[in-house]
Image (cartoon, helix red, strand yellow):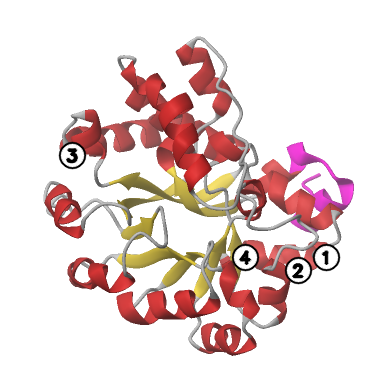
Amino acid sequence: MDLSFSETLLLGSIREIRRIPKSDLHNHCLLGGRRQVVEKYYGKKLTKFKAAETGIGDLNRWIGKVYRPFFDLPGAFEKAVEAAFIQARVDGVTRLEMSIDVSFGRVFKISADRIVATLKYYHKKVAPEIEFRPELGFSRSIPVQTLMKDFESFIYLNYFSSIDLYDDEFAQPINNFKELYRICRKQGMKRKAHAGEFGSADSVKEAVETLELDEVQHGIGAAGSPEAMKWLADNRIQLNVCPTSNIKMKRVRSYKTHPIRVLFDHGVKVTINTDDALVFGDGVSEQYLKLYKRGVFTAEELDVIRGNGR
């Protein structure tokens, strides 16, 4: 007999939770793969990520020192994409919004056409049942002029349905990206951006207003302001939250103290997502179970959150 989502949480079976359809709307493709798949192809284990301090710096150093050498192998880019779809399939994800950095073509010396072909191929091969909505990602640490030039190769392919702005929130003013987001809006793309991952409630509201965002990636800084939360709720701005990422990056101390509960109680629409499953270890399923076991949410409340992403 098939179990309901609430019943799988009560049972505490990660295997059964994975069988239940769910979304992952905040996923950085090359960092979102199944670790075992990448390590098998690499021929060695990846040193586990451990942050020493709050912020994005330790993650970027881990990527450069530990993960970047993997991409020197022939076919590594394709294997990382395959691993991302395998992870989503195993996790029971049925709606996937997964980003590819707009600068990967330049960094890895591969064409935009090849990137798109790779995404299409592994989506069809590995998880054709998933509703895949490809996303283009832009690093806030890169000059806007460079990003615009990188973007030129992708803009006319009519493949990507949304965009995201990520990396160091404090690298440059959010207003610098206004023209980029205007172009993407004209293209009919959903507009997301990282805000409030480490920044304040004001930074979340500023990002939404300046870039005319549809959704915010993370956004947990908004929990520090009842006024900001009311504004998000009133304007129906969804926050795609990644609890394990926030804990592993030392932004939040534990699941028990994670501000997703405060956001939910203030009427803000939230979803639960992986961010970087290869780095942080948890799929969406594991996070649902941990939030339930720690008493952060009831099974029924978690089913409401699961429904937000569908």
Q: Which residue is mark 1?
A: 298
Query: Nearest the camera: 174 or 243?
Result: 174
- Position of residue 238 measured from the top left corner of the image (x, y, whole percent): 52, 72
Q: Is residue 234 above or below residue 219?
A: below
Q: Is residue 147 above or below residue 209?
A: above
Question: Spatial distance from mark 4 to mark 1, Cα to Cα?
Answer: 14 Å
Question: Spatial distance from mark 4 to mark 2, Cα to Cα?
Answer: 10 Å
Q: Which residues lie in the magenta part? A: 1-16
SS of the residue under disc 1: loop
| Kind of residue at badge 4 | Gly
Q: Which residue is mark 3?
A: 112
SS of the residue under disc 2: helix
Query: Nearest the camera: 173 or 296?
Result: 173
- Position of residue 177 measured from the top left corner of the image (x, y, whole percent): 25, 67
**Furthest residue in direction front, as rendered:** 53
Question: Spatial distance from mark 3 to mark 2, Cα to Cα?
Answer: 41 Å
Contact between labelled residues 1 and 4, with CB atoms less than 8 Å apart = no
| Kind of residue at badge 1 | Thr
**Crowd band around label 2 with a 10 angstrom C-alpha radius: few (<14), some (14–19), many (20+):** some
Q: Is residue 175 left or right of residue 231?
A: left
